[in-house]
Image (cartoon, rainbow, N blue to C red):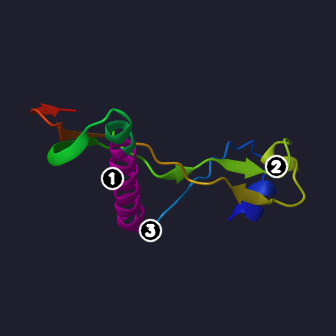
Amino acid sequence: MLSVISTSKAKPKVDIAFTLKDDSEIKEEVLRNASNNARKKAEILASTSGVKLGKLISIDYSWKDIELYSDTNYCDSKPISKMSSIDIEPKDIKIEGSVTFIWEIEDEHSSYDL
């Protein structure tokens, strides 16, 4: 298909995007990493503050309408119709989300929300 476009007399504008067939595995991995990272940081903050991390009170997260597509690089900046060959290299797919964890913290005298 791209070879036909590249030999066309028309001046087509072509956008190519790469994505994942099944994005559930990557989203699950991101959630696992976020959870582990948040717990480690909360434990460090609690420990250095002289308190103990208590029970987890709530978790709130948002994917912000995630679209898992990779930017695409062409091998050349020439218009596609003037290219003798088409080399395409996708960039890494990036994913972002926001997760808020709220833990109870405990000290010798009482409990507080962190």
Q: Residue furthest front?
A: 108
Q: Nearer the viewer, mark 2 or mark 1?
A: 1
Q: Residue furthest left?
A: 110
Residue at horizontal 70 percent and vertical 44 percent from the top: 12
Q: Amino acid at mark 2?
A: Ser
Residue 21: image tag: 3
Q: Quadrant of the N terminus?
A: bottom right
Q: Amino acid at mark 1?
A: Ser
Residue at horizontal 62 percent and vertical 52 percent from the top: 16
Foreground pick, 27 / 7: 27
Q: Which residue is mark 2?
A: 81
Answer whether labels 2 and 1 touch (C-beta < 8 Å): no
Q: Nearer the viewer, mark 1 or mark 3?
A: 1
Residue at horizontal 38 percent and vertical 67 percent from the top: 25
Q: Position of residue 14 (x, y in %)?
A: 66, 47
Res 45 → quadrant: top left
Foreground pick, 112 / 48: 48
Q: Amino acid at mark 3?
A: Lys
Q: Which residue is mark 1?
A: 35
Give the spatial CA distance, label 1 vs label 3: 25 Å
* Numbered disc 3: secondary structure: loop
- Span highlighted in magenta in the image: 21-43
Q: Nearer the viewer, mark 3 or mark 2?
A: 3
Image position of 88 (left or right of 59): right
Residue 5 vertical placement versus 109 (above, below): below
Res 3 → quadrant: bottom right
Residue 15: image tag: none
Q: Position of residue 110 (x, y in %)?
A: 9, 33
Give the spatial CA distance, label 3 vs label 2: 30 Å
N-terminal-most mark, 2 or 1: 1
